[in-house]
Amino acid sequence: MKKILFVVNTMGRAGAETALLELMRILDGPEYEVSLYVILAQGEMIGQLPPHVKLMNQRVSSRSVMTGRGKLAMAGTICSAFFRNGGYLGKIHCIIRNFAEMRKAGKLQMDKLLWRMISDGAVRTEEVFDLAVAYLEGASAYYVADHVKARHKAGFIHIDYRSAGYTRRMDRNCWGRFDRIFGVSDEVREHFLAVYPEYGKKTKVFHNIINQDQIRSRAKEEGGFPDDYAGARLLTVGRLTYQKAYDIAIEAMKLVKDAGFAARWYVLGEGSERRQLEKKIAALKLKEDFVLLGAVTNPYPYYVQADLYVHATRFEGKSIAIQEAQTLGCAVIASDRNGNREQIENGHDGILCDLDPQAIAESIIELLEDKEKRKALGGAAAKKDMTQAQELRMLLELL
């Protein structure tokens, strides 16, 4: 029996965690013993772990890291990490150094600031694994590289590495201790190698594995939009973060409304930018037109009830939300940015546009006025096979 350990930062409701759940579901058989360690020991998707997966954490919370109580729980975990395993001066020095580097770059990112300290203060085990997999960048990668005993190690990259704020100095050559590095798209691989060109031979592309049959099945369950709005519904699924560019989307919606279209834009997701976005929505008098619904357990009925799916983000790795929307036959509009352009054949199974309010608004208006084009784009998207079952071989060959 081969012992496989997956490590992830949280089990929050997001694309990478969704893909991880599906990957672990596939690894269900007598030949594998699958374990999971969650660095911050919380996330609303912890309850969805497959029965055969052994959770290494002694204590876990299903609270979202985006809620008030969830943030308090996370703060407690971070404090415990500082005092666990010693090395206090080294942890303080690392925080100060990262802070100085971020300040010089002009952007302070709390997760990047603390990831190294959190990984050094995470609970350790003497168990030896055949394969240890860091399924996310940051704390997961640092923890697997430095503190996990395994015959082989693999790491996953889900984002545009440089745009996300990671640097060689911050990583302290953690990637040199991995046997294989997987980018979830060709662009993700290219951007990672722009930072680490020396790892070209061991960096491969491993597309997200999704269960299209399950997505289509769950889309038929009860749920979806809570109102009886009669106009066109636009949908976006994703956390309320800077990366997702909701500030630009709100301005685009203002242009759509000013053009006289009966439309309402809904967002499924929670995040740190909620207050700022609510202020912008109010300032542009869009309280009834740009609706932040928060995170939901089953987003799939919303997709099938929407007229358009819009994914106008600043950068991506490979968006699970776009894959879900295409699986369910949505007409998709996405910004022509890293990660998005690889998933859409412009004009065939979706539309790519510039990331500015005018271009987004024009793309929305074009499809709202052309029902047949919406239908054609959605039909082509629904035919795409995104199961990616062949990807599993690249991981298991490390065993």
Image (cartoon, rainbow, N blue to C red):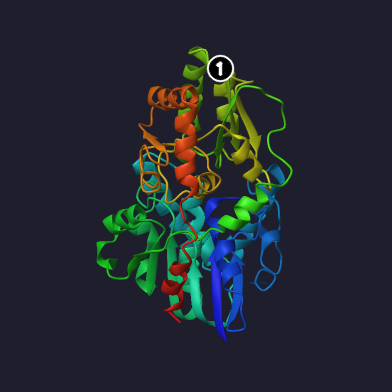
Residue 158 x, y percent position in the rendering: 44, 55
Location of residue 290 (image quadrant) = top right
Q: How many marks?
A: 1
Please, which residue is most extreme toward the bottom here?
1
Q: Is residue 122 above or below residue 366?
A: below
Viewer-nearest residue: 300 or 155: 300
Q: Is residue 174 visible?
A: no
Tag 1 secondary structure: helix
Q: Is residue 341 above or below residue 146?
A: above
Viewer-nearest residue: 8 or 158: 158
Viewer-nearest residue: 62 or 379: 379
Please state if 335 lies on the left or on the right of 280 as rendered. left
Q: Quadrant of the N terminus?
A: bottom right
Residue depicted at x 48% and y 32%: 374
Residue depicted at x 71% and y 65%: 59
Identify residue type, mark 1.
Ala
The residue at which mark 1 appears reads as 283
**Neighbour tally class for label 1: few under 14, some 14-19, many 20 plus, Cα within 10 Å:** few
Residue 56 x, y percent position in the rendering: 65, 72
Q: Is residue 323 visible?
A: yes
Please state if 217 lies on the left or on the right of 369 as rendered. right
Please state if 101 lies on the left or on the right of 122 as rendered. left
Please state if 43 lies on the left or on the right of 178 as rendered. right
Residue depicted at x 66% and y 68%: 57
Residue 76 x, y percent position in the rendering: 66, 55
Please, which residue is most extreme toward the left here?
198
